[in-house]
Image (cartoon, grey):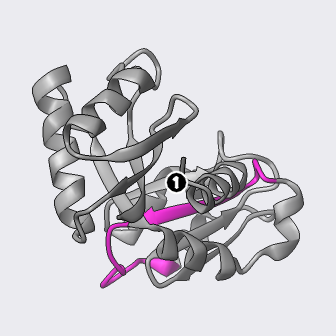
């Protein structure tokens, strides 16, 4: 069995695309997932599965949600190794003391033509960012709620992404290190 982390985007936000975690866990179990655990309501799932293809798992989970709930969220399934690589590649180690201000955008692929100049132009005086392969790191000491950079990052990277703050990433690391 392989340990995976599923990162769902756009569920349970602003009253739209409601998906209780209990329902999601049951759905994953019908797809053959074992030791399924969720973290907060925004779509963070750790599970084990025999399948070795993360893209295949992503498609199956998204399709199953569409069939049962009537909407198709973006689902990115990553390996435990990728999560570890994202954590160890963090270019802002000083920022982990403020885990809600440091974000990792998990990208579906390495961006072929990211517009780093426009990202830099949107960066506020206090913000820092760095693209490291298929991860985009954003340290936003003033929060991401009003950050123009955070709002435009995915479009300017030109790949599908889903962001998690350092607290969530750390919790997922802990959960994936000790699957039930």
Q: Which residues are magenta?
A: 99-116
Say which quadrant the N terminus sits in.
bottom left
* Residue 118 shows up from this direction: no
Residue 165 x, y percent position in the rendering = 65, 52
Give the residue drawn at x 41%, y 60%: 4
Give above or below for 103 relative to 27.
Answer: below
Q: Label 1, secondary structure: give it.
A: strand
Crowding near the residue tagged with mark 1, few <14, some 14–19, many ≥20 C-alpha atoms within 10 Å: many
Residue 64 vertical placement versus 96 (above, below): above
Q: Position of residue 128 (x, y in %)?
A: 72, 70
Figure label count: 1
Residue at label 1? 163
Q: Nearer the viewer, residue 118 or 173?
A: 173
Residue at 15% from the left image edge and 49% from the top image edge: 60
Residue 133 appears at what percent x and percent y?
46, 84
Residue situated furthest top in the rendering: 15
Is 107 left, or right, of 93 in this rendering? Answer: left
Residue 29 visible within the image: yes
Q: Tell me the chief SS of the magenta region.
A: loop
Which quarter of the picture shows residue 112?
bottom left
At horizontal 49% and vertical 68% (from top left) the residue drawn is 80
Q: Position of residue 137 (x, y in %)?
A: 61, 69
Q: Residue at x 88, y 72 (%)?
A: 94
* 158 and 1: which is toward the camera: 1
Residue 99, compared with residue 96, is above or below; it is above
């Amino acid at each position: 069995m392989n340990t995976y982390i599923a990162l769902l985007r756009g569920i349970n936000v602003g009253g739209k695309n409601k998906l209780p975690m209990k329902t999601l866990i049951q759905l994953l179990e019908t797809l053959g997932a074992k030791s399924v655990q969720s973290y907060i309501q925004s779509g963070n799932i750790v599970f084990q599965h025999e399948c070795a293809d993360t893209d295949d798992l992503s498609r199956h989970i998204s399709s199953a949600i569409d069939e049962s709930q009537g909407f198709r969220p973006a689902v990115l399934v990553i390996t435990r190794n990728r999560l570890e690589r994202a954590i160890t590649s963090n270019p802002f180690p000083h920022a982990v003391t403020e885990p809600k201000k440091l974000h990792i955008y998990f990208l579906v692929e390495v961006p072929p033509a990211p517009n780093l100049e426009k990202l830099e132009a949107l960066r506020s005086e206090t913000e820092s960012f760095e693209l490291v392969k298929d991860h985009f790191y954003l340290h936003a000491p003033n929060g991401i709620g009003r950050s123009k950079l955070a709002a435009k990052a995915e479009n300017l990277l030109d790949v599908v992404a889903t962001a998690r703050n350092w607290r969530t990433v750390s919790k997922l690391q802990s959960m994936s290190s000790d699957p039930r």
